[in-house]
Amino acid sequence: MKISIEVEIQPDEVGLATELLSTLRTLTDHVKVVMPGAGALPASAAPAALQPATIPPAPATAPAPAAPAMPNGTAPYQSARPVTAPAPQVPPQQQPLQQQQAPAPAPPAPQAAPAPPAPAPVAPPPVAPPPPQAHPQPFSVTVPALANPATQEQATADIVAALRAAPDMTQAAEDLAAAFEQHVFTNQEVFGSPPGVVQHMTLFQRLPEDVLPKARQKIMAKVLATLNTKRPIDANRLSFFGHADAFASLVKMEAVPMDGAVQTVTRLLNNAGMRCAAVTMLGKIVEYCREQLLRVPEEHLRALWRGLELVKEEALQYDMQYILGSLHSMAPQAAQQPAPTPAAPAAEPAAAPAQPPPAAPAPAPAAAPAAAAAPPPGPVPSAISHLGCYTGHNATVFTLCYDAVHGQLYSGGQDGCLLVWGPEGTPVSRMDCSSYFVCSLDVLPRSGTLLAAAVPNPEGPSATASPPPCVMGFVPPPGGAPGVPRVGQWSSRGRLNSVQRGIISFVRALGGEGDVFAMGEQVDQGTASKDVVRLYDASRGGPMEQLTPLTVYGEHRDMVTCAAPWNLNPHVFVSGSRDATIRVWDRRMAQSVGCFGEPNSATGQMQAHSDLVTCVDTTDNLLLSASVDGFMCIWDFRQLNMTHGSVAGPVVKLQIDTQPILKVAVTGAPHSRLAAISTYQGLYVMDFNNMSAPHTIAPPPFADGRPFKYYHDIRWAGGPGAPGQPVLFAASDDPRIDLYGLSF
């Protein structure tokens, strides 16, 4: 009688099975060991730990098998338990039954070439850890768990189990799609985070074929139904941004063919009511998989370019800058199509070149990359000279503002006076704010309302009952056509007081539709302060006291010191802070859409400068920043992905005279590569057409011999988007406002 025994063991049961196999061998020689993933082995060929003691084992530790890579760089959850490689296998007939005495050595043989070494025995592949035990769970539990790579595998198994166990898989797939809608697509904490929805969408790479089609069909139907909804061009994108991100993620994972995605986007571009969604979808596709996009059939790519030519709306121009800049910088064949021409201010360069740009040069500390290619260079200044003074204040002038529409200068300072200047250099209007120091001014472009950020004057007439810091609004006198200075009495629109008497550091008009402005505020919260940027829309009517914030941003860790709009996109602005950071904001989004900076070697945190950021200003695609650290940096918006957590480094970093820099002004300059710079030591005008060797000039000493006093604020006689006059205004501790003229 022949007895055959087959034993199945797991890798972690090897130690326990040794004694069992020894017992079984006393019954029969036909004992077979089965290890999952390694096939059936005779007992004599079992791992070393299962061999009789006469054959000492020589186990070797092998690394766990590498997890399969996911398209987004993550990997599925895998046990960290090491796997022991089985000992080399020996055929049964060669297995020694007992130890033999070594034979006597043979006579020496003739010398011959040595035989090649025998190939090393191949060990069977290491055993993978068992898959997770699947338990049907509510989708409201499993879908959020997809966000964590450590729980993705278990969550996927539970989702598959729930789909398979459902009496109606179609309805179960509908429920899964509803869970994605609630917990992913409309959850701002998910789509507003740096990974976006990509982690959740990796589910479609893991689903088995028996459940994948239904699940993909229902979720795609949910995504496309939202994206195909008609909405205004300036609609709030938070309502569909997650869906656009999901669509692009599926394209990236090739769950949706790129060719079909391009045709869908093209169809939506041709419908004005769906254009906002189409541009958002395309922006995410370009971000995730622009190389794939440029490999679609030529006729579909041509149709896409024709669709992009229809996008003229101002609200979409920032997206168009990113899309066109990305595509044209990558593929010459894309640039062979006529480049769509987005609406832009008259003097700005086209958003995308008509010919392919040159290849990006090798990185250099002072050279601008190809993405920051400058417009045709303007004239190089040869001299700056003092033209005269505006007199009217009796104390330090802190702030200036120039209204290019009416050709007027506004000023405010320590004396609590707001002055509106006529073209002859004399005040034509005066507003009394004697209880305050006026620290920041700006004009709302739509209504002409003058905004003044003010802090209480401790020695003012109301010193005994100090008023709270505020932003005051003043309505211009009637009349005043463009090009005609406003003369007459400005009426008060009230005061927007700070929250909990916090310090207001600046007020800046942001342009675009409405009369949106930003206000920097440091709110005292007892043991700590909160540093925020608040957005308001003055076009909503009523006095300033009744305005409520549109948005409050609180990502800065110290006082927010300055802000500036990006004039190519009315939705985007930047802010600088005492925490040495510069953050970029899109007022349609609840979080920052990136920051400019480099990692601090000591703290690891991203910083634009090593000290307080004193000023920021923008010109076409560039941002200029100044700091107490003595450096002026130039940054390129096109190098930023415009997603929360994205970072871009400086194009160039320049030191002017080793002294702290107080102000930099480029808006309204005679051309877009001309900056005025105020430091503790002097005033300079820099032409940075050649960023590796900028041309810098300074004015001579004053003819009347008075000493130089550093300037708190400087302004060109011009506005955004068009060349200004070669005239520069500068305000200092000397109550006079100095005028400088530029020669070329």
Image (cartoon, grey):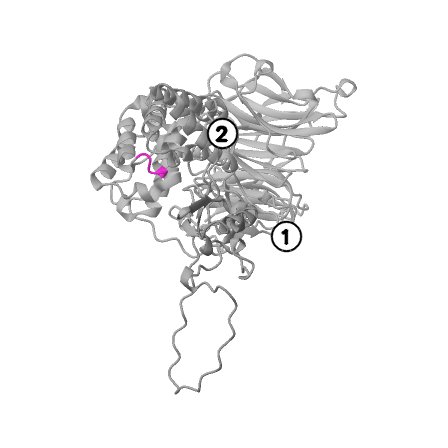
Query: Left or right of 47: which side holds 528?
Result: right
| Mark whose residue sits in front, 1 or 2 | 2
**Disc 2 element:** helix
x 34%, y 52%: residue: 358
Task: Residue 284 in the image: state x and y as whole percent.
Answer: 39, 35
Q: Amino acid at mark 2?
A: Val
Q: Which residue is mark 2?
A: 190
Query: Where 148 sits versus 676, above or below?
Result: above
The stretch in magenta equals: 252-256
Query: Where 140 sits versus 586, above or below?
Result: above
In front: 505, or 574? 574
Q: Amino acid at mark 1?
A: Thr
Query: Where 518 sits versus 28, above or below?
Result: above
x 37%, y 23%: residue: 173
Q: Is residue 253 visible?
A: yes
Neighbours of disc 1 within 10 Å: few (<14), some (14-19), many (20+): some
Q: Is residue 310 visible?
A: no
Which residue of the protein is positioned furthest toward the front in this rendering? Answer: 1
Majority SS type along the magenta span:
loop
In front: 408, or 143? 143
Task: Residue 218 in the image: state x and y as whole percent.
Answer: 34, 24
Neighbours of disc 2 within 10 Å: few (<14), some (14-19), many (20+): many
| 253 inside magenta stretch | yes
Task: Residue 492 in the image: state x and y as whole percent.
Answer: 59, 16
Query: Left or right of 403: which side holds 330?
Result: left
Among the two numbered marks 1 and 2 on one chain, the one whose residue lies closer to the N terminus = 2
Q: Which residue is mark 1?
A: 658
